[in-house]
Amino acid sequence: MSADPTQVLAFETDCHIFDGCGFPAPGLHSFLFEPLWGDADSNLYFNKTMLLALLGSVIIVGFFWAAFRKPKLVPGKLQMVAEAGYDFVRRGIVYETIGKKDGEKYVPLMVSLFFVIWMMNLWSIIPVAQFPVTAIISYPAALAGIVYILWVVLTFKKHGFVGAFKNFTGYDKSLGGVLPLSMTIEFFSNLLVRPFTHAVRLFANMFAGHTLLLLFTIASWYLLNGIGFAYAGVSFVMVIVMTAFELFIQAVQAYVFVLLACSYVQGALAKGH
């Protein structure tokens, strides 16, 4: 391996099978990047993942601004695509989960979450970038934190302190003697485990997907030597297959994240707690 594995490539480009070097397997070093600006030791720095997150946000804002800055009754291609995406989240996720009446005010947030997450996921298969921002846990955690705060605030606002407590603990007096145990489990599950799993679900899927892509990509290059050429072709086919699969997973993970966010909002607004 190179002296500094945090550079652009996460493996040695001059290392091939039968050259006497081992397979440069991807690892945690594949998810670490040197600061583009600042000093990592001081925690004041700007690196590749931050740049991709910023660019992704700018791209999404720019896309919707360009699509809707001069809306037309008969939409052009850009406006039509933007409207289709917006309507998919509004009708297919928000309305279906929260309902049209209660859900309308949360549509802008959910649309923003969906497309920002999708864009951050898509960086994984875009040349030069080639890294999913959501494979760094801090980004999914921040987004899950926004949803968590919204859910808690809405629950207190809708039900008051006592009602919110019942909501968080799943209070049901019909449970009898097991009620204290049930309430304790529900309390920790809702207030501690829920935001954690919300973030980790997105992070783990993108982390695993990127690792597999790296594995087959590195293997394709590593096997380009002698008889290894035949195996390199098989590995490269797997790169193509995994890339296509990642395209699907990236959209699904954005969908699932927003679907769960909507279900939390729906639970906070629901009556009868």
Image (cartoon, rainbow, N blue to C red):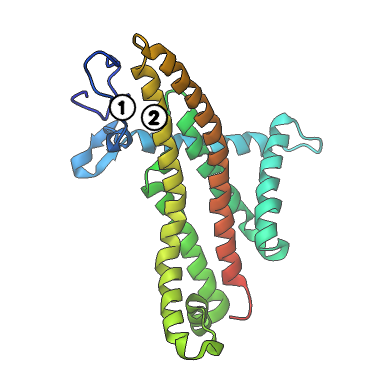
Residue type, numbered disc 2: Leu
Question: Residue farthest to the right?
Answer: 74
- Number of the label disc, if any, that sits on residue 214: 2
> Position of 23 compared to 239: left or right?
left
State which quadrant residue 105 falls in: bottom right
- Residue 212 picture location, percent across and down: 42, 34
> Position of 253 compared to 221: left or right?
right
Question: Where 88 falls versus 242 (above or below)?
Answer: below
State which quadrant residue 96 falls in: bottom right
**Residue shown at the point (69%, 35%) measured from the top left:** 81
Q: Is residue 67 visible?
A: yes
Q: Which residue in the protein does label 1 denote? A: 10
Q: Secondary structure at mark 2?
A: helix
Residue type, numbered disc 1: Ala
Q: Nearer the viewer, residue 109 or 170?
A: 170
- Residue 135 picture location, percent across and down: 40, 42
Question: Residue farthest to the top?
Answer: 226
Question: Where 124 falls versus 185 (above or below)?
Answer: above
- Residue 106 picture location, percent across and down: 61, 58
Q: Is residue 112 visible?
A: no
**Residue shown at the point (65%, 61%) measured from the top left:** 97
- Residue 80 picture location, percent across and down: 73, 36
Q: Measure how far apart labels 2 and 1 are at the Cα level.
A: 9 Å
Q: Do the CB atoms of the residues marked 2 and 1 lie less than 8 Å apart?
A: yes
